[in-house]
Image (cartoon, rainbow, N blue to C red):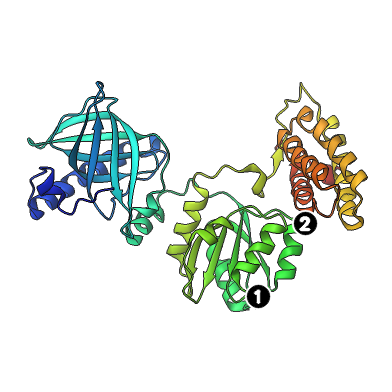
Amino acid sequence: MSQHNDLNGELQLRLRAPERQALLRSLLALVNDEYRNIHDRRKHNRYVPLHTDAIAELEHPGGSKVSCAILVYDISPRGIGFATRSYLHQDTIITISLRTNDGEMTKVQGRVNRCEYYDNRFHRVGITLTEKIDPRIYVSNGEWEQHTSRSDDKSWIIPRKALHIEPDELGSNAIEMMLGNAKIACTKATTIGRAIDAIHTDSYDLILLSDTADQSGVLNVLTQLQSNGYAGPLIVITSTTYTCDKTLTDLGVHTVLHKPVQLTPLITALRSIFENRDDIQNESSNIYSNLTPAQCSDEHLLKFLHITKDLSKQLESSISNDDYSRALKNCNSLYSAGAGFGYPVLSSTAASAIQSLNASCSAQESAMELRKLIRIIARLHPREGTPSSKDAA
């Protein structure tokens, strides 16, 4: 892909540096005013990219394409705002070449949803992106932290549970205190063995892993966590030069924080993880039946949940004894009844366990899927405000 070093000169944006900065400031002031007015209606934060000069390729209805220089002032997971000399018709297909914060060139595509005359010489354009993007790769660390750690927007904060793997007591206490600012309860594990025991028996929304937790190294520990059924987000806390590369992201790492961890970067990472997260299988929140009392009484739900708790114990025993037949029978029962009692996630998780059992003919080899099912069962409750089967017993 060709690279444009002088965007203003080559494609005729024709702006000197002071003029470009003045235009950028005026557009950002306008966005900030709009943001305050429609804050509650916007699902995503807007950010200023590190590299504001970009190239846009426009595809006209007849199939012809033309390139022009643009000044990007507003970027979000679903949209981009920019200024350009030309008027662009609504629904025009547009491809923008954006430079990431580490200098790589990427292309994003969308459609024009508005174009307004602005400042006598320019048009202000907004596009809706075809696919969601990650704004973090286009903005500076300071820009990201400034917006994502704002104290006036805590809509993403709900009670959650985290597991922190850290042998140092003071370091662990500091993280526990900081997590409390986001209503996250912290379970501490000083060894990998204790951490694995914890994820076998409980569900967590997040795991924080210190690079001093085990001599085998971070990659080995991450692999162990994954092979033991943890599939949620992770934060690696390190005193070395780890970066969040593809090897780490493939193992579930969302962010790498360097010691000593401070509150603002941690809250920024937490917000990025949880703001738009929707993954019921890998959370710690209670799971309630979607049936109304008229469709299924509390008594029937409590009886069903009592049976599922017993089946959960049998599944754990099946893993220990490698009892394939018993595990398969119990999974089939949970699959058949889960959705009927208003717990579709129970049926879908049981289906994955059945598939694994049929492929391996071994409960121990299917332990990862079976333990996911065990953790889902532990989160089942009748309805909000109704005593759980454990409480009723």
Q: Is residue 24 left or right of residue 242?
A: left
State whether residue 264 is above or below residue 45: below
Q: Name the image quarter holding the C terminus.
A: top right
Residue placed at 85% from the left, 30% from the top? 300
Q: Position of residue 283 (x, y in %)?
A: 64, 48
Q: Which residue is mark 1?
A: 216
Q: Is residue 339 visible?
A: yes
Label 1, residues with CA under 10 Å away: few <14, some 14-19, many ≥20: few
Instruction: Give SS at disc 2.
Output: helix
In which quarter of the view is residue 14 placed?
top left
Residue 393 appears in the figure: no
In the rendering, at what x and y percent does residue 208 appear?
59, 64
Q: Is residue 252 above or below residue 295?
A: below
Mark 1 residue type: Ser
Closer to the camera in the image, 283 or 301 = 283
Mark 2 closeness class: few <14, some 14–19, many ≥20 residues within 10 Å: few
Q: Position of residue 114 (x, y in %)?
A: 25, 29
Total marks in image: 2
| Badge 1 element | loop
Discs 2/1, front: 1
Q: Residue at x 87, y 42 (%)?
A: 328
As measured in the structure, the alpha-carbon distance from the residue carrying label 2 to the one carrying label 1 is 24 Å
At label 2, the amino acid type is Thr
Q: Nearer the viewer, residue 243 or 262?
A: 243
Q: Position of residue 149 (x, y in %)?
A: 41, 56
Residue at the image position 74 percent from the left and 62 percent from the top: 198
Residue 201 circle label? 2
Q: Quadrant of residue 38?
A: top left
**Would residue 239 appear left or right of 111 to someone viewing this image?**
right
